[in-house]
Amino acid sequence: MKKIKSQKGITMISLILYVASFAAITLVVGGITTFFYSNIQVMDESIGSNSEYNKFNLYLLNECKKPGATIYAIQGTNNTGSNPKELSSLSSGETDLQDFITFKSDSGMNSFIFDSENKNLYYNSIKLCQNVEDFQLILDKTQGKDILTVLININGTAFQTKYVVGS
């Protein structure tokens, strides 16, 4: 009987199987990584929108709750004339406002100004929010109180909040 020598080494079939296995594992890991990082980017954008809104909400809530707070003047794209309208000149009921609102309190006057060209929202000279796509204020005076509804869209995320001015 003849002894058959064992041939050690990598055959062509083994090499193809190793390369195919490595490629499959690399594709799976790459797909999972791509999915993970694309979701991180979506989460970053939504967190950015929420932080911008929270900053705006903090300033507006502070203005509404100051001692002696009242809405002093407003101006919007739906109003006629170039000068701000004073609150006393508005009729009761809902009025759609945009662009500008000024609060008067015991500590002074402060304004929220929407710059639609640059998509920025300012508190006096402080830039509160960027990438503001839409900003609307609705004033309801029918219940004996000034109820201000704010509709704001930041980076495609819409927020709506109601504030009672000078409770």
Image (cartoon, grey):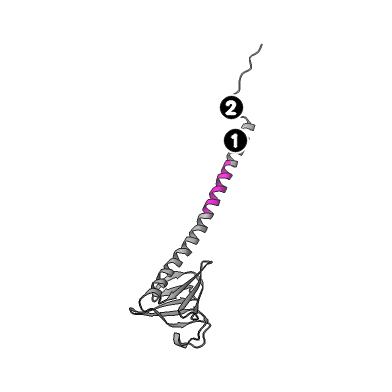
- Of pointers 1 and 2, the one earlier in the residue sequence: 2
Residue shown at 62% from the left, 35% from the top: 17
**Quadrant where the image shows the C terminus:** bottom left
Residue most extreme to the left: 107
Q: Mark 1 sits on what residue?
A: 18
Residue type marked 1: Tyr
Residue in the foreground of this view, choosing between 118 and 68: 68
Residue at the farthest right position:
1
- Which quadrant, please, contains the N terminus? top right
Counting from the top left corner in percent of width and height, residue 40 is at 50, 55
Reply above or below: 8 against 24. above
Q: 101 above or below 38?
A: below
Q: Looking at the image, which residue is at 60% across and 38% down?
A: 21
- Point out the stretch of residues depicted in magenta: 25-37
Q: Closer to the camera, 31 or 48?
A: 48
Residue 115: percent from left, percent from top = 47, 76
The answer to the question of whether label 1 and label 2 lie on touching residues, with beta carbons closer than 8 A, is no
- Residue 40's place in the image compared with 151, above or below, is above
Q: Secondary structure at mark 2?
A: loop
Taken as a whole, is the magenta stretch helix, strand or loop?
helix
In the picture provided, is 90 more to the left or to the right than 125? Answer: right
Residue 54: quadrant of the picture: bottom left
Report which residue position mark 2 lands on.
9
Q: Nearer the viewer, residue 80 or 64?
A: 64
Number of numbered discs on residues: 2
Q: Which of pointers 1 and 2 indicates the residue nearer the eye?
A: 1
The amino acid pointed to by label 2 is: Gly
